[in-house]
Every structure is written in structure tokens, then in C-alpha cells.
Amino acid sequence: MIYFKYMSSPRTFFEDGFIRLTQRSALNDPFEAVYSADGLNDLVNHFDDQTVSDDSYKEVSFNQYIENSIDKVGIISLSESKDNLLMWAHYADEHKGIVVGISSFGSTNIFSNLFLPSALTSSSLINYTPFDGIIRPIIYRKELRYRNDRFDFDYSNICVEGGARILSEVFLQKSEEWIYEKEHRIILRLEQADKAIIYNIQDLKNTKIKNDIHSFKWAKFNKKKNCYEIKLNEIGDEYHRYAVSSCLASLSNDSRNIYLMKLGTSAISHCLFGLNCSFEIDKLAVSYARSTGYFEYWRAIKNNAYYCLEFEQI
């Protein structure tokens, strides 16, 4: 299936394959991941275990687990629709931008090499994580998650799924006001990022990690932008990478900070130019996207009878 990502500008996307994993502080909906705490408490009363282990292996309530971890979650938003006029206007710079076609094959993820450290999987005999890179549809409803729908879903394996299940699903429900977007999401932990651009590195509390960022080749300071560019996917040791990425995730409340995931080359399949787009094909750097051989260009055109878009292949 092909999903679509609206962009105001391709920047270097087709050249390096990096796509933003957006933290909650940088999202445009103030109701993101808002849920009914009372409803969740009522649901948890029906679980065999009313507490869950947090990142520091302390037993906490499900509500506390979410509050402790909610800002360490990032999302990649995609859409079923490539021709929504509102989304072209809002997310693609008034039709001057582009829409990227992203191909997903079955239950496999779309990333070049998804980082999934053992710390982010359940400690049970069955390794479980909802942060598996799979694209999942948004649920649209009037009321907050767990308000009245808490018994609409199967929680029979919650003892295995734990707090991670609850943490991920609060990002998979939105107000029905957004239904026109036909959104699907990939929910990941920010610790899984392949790259990070950090503007407030001075706020890191871990002195060792801060020194590593100043000294290792996988991190460099961008003088022009006054930020650090940290290539987490170049850190070979899993535990070292997780230690660094955990510290960087703690800085997510600064919406300037950018966390990025690297897509697999086969996932990038289409580039759709907007009605008012001025980008020229021969000047668009697409070496990474075209490295698998399959990549198409399309252009939006006006339908002469209806308020809708059509697309012609270039």
C-alpha cells in the first residue's frame, strides 16, 4: 500500500532518506495524547496487575507511566489521501510543496535499519513492543481515549504488553474533527531515532554523554545553525547508542530539536508536485530515493468540472 506525506519542501529528503519523528511538543494539536485518566484507572482495575515497571524499573501506576514517558514518544504522520485540498494548503505550503509516496509492504517496517534495543521490548518470554515501525490507522472519536471506549479493545495480553501498550495507543486516537486527514501513524520512541539535531545540548545533565558528543566523530557542531548534528545510527554499540539517545530524548520539550528516522530506499516510491510547485526535476537531488530503481514523478492538475485534483505522470 502507498501512504502519503505532505511536505512544504523536499529539502534533502530524496537525497538522504531522513524523515522527522515528531515529539509531542512540536505537534499542532493541543489534544495530542490527551486521555481520560479516570477512565484509564477504571480500566486498570480490571487488570491482574495494576502497576507496571517504568524505564528505571520502578513499579508505578499506568497513569504515572504515561506521564513519565509521554514526551519520549515520537510520531510519523502519513495519509491515505494524496489529493486533499486542505492538506495541500496547510502542510504543503499552499500547493507550492510536494507529497511523497511511501510504499509499505505487509507487516514489515519502512526503515533502513530500525533500532530496537532490548530496553524497549517487554521483559517477558514473548518479546513485545508497539514501537515496531508498523503503520497503524488513527481512530477518530468525539470523546477522549478511555472515556467510554475502554472496554472496546482486547487487553487480555496486557500483562505482557505492559505500559508500552497504553503509552502507544494514546497517540492513535484523535478528535473526529481531523477525520478528513485519513491519517495513519508510526509510533516510536525518540530513543530509536537515527539522527538528532539538538539546539540545547547545554541542558544535558549527563556529563559523560555531553563529553562524548563533543569528542566522537558521529557528532558535529553546526556553527551556522548553532546546533549539534548527532548521527546516532553510526554508534556501533547498542548500549552506548541507547545511553546517548535516551539523554537526547530528555530534551524533547524544546520543539526546536529534531529527531529523524532513515527510511529504506524501497519505501520512497513517488514524488507528487503541487499545483503551484516551482521545483524542477533535473535540479532535485534524488540519489537515495532512486537507488532501488523504482521512483516516479507526478504533477497535480486542476479538474475542470469539480473542486478536486488529478495527477499526471511526468
Image (cartoon, rainbow, N blue to C red):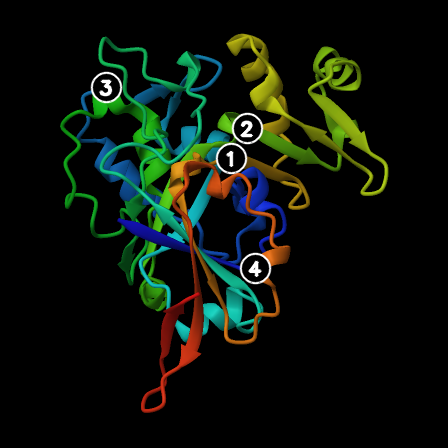
Mark found first going from the N terminus, 4 or 2:
2
Mark found first going from the N terminus, 1 or 3:
3
Residue 198, above or below 225: above
User: CA separation, marks 4 and 1?
Assistant: 25 Å
User: CA separation, marks 1 and 3?
Assistant: 27 Å
The residue located at (52%, 69%) in the rendering is 90
> Can you give x and y, in whole percent of width and height, for residue 148 in the image?
21, 52
The residue located at (35%, 75%) in the rendering is 310
Q: Evaluate if marks 1 and 2 touch, with contact meaning CB atoms under 8 Å apart.
A: yes
Instruction: Give the label on residue 281, or none.
Output: 4
Q: Evaluate if marks 1 and 3 touch, with contact meaning CB atoms under 8 Å apart.
A: no
- Nearest the viewer among 39 and 296 is 296
Image-quadrant location for residue 234:
top right
Mark found first going from the N terminus, 2 or 3:
3
Residue projecting furthest to the bottom: 305
The residue labelled by disc 1 is 261
Image-quadrant location for residue 118:
top left
- Nearest the viewer among 293 and 61 is 293
User: CA separation, marks 3 and 4?
Assistant: 49 Å
Looking at the rendered structure, the kind of residue marked 3 is Val
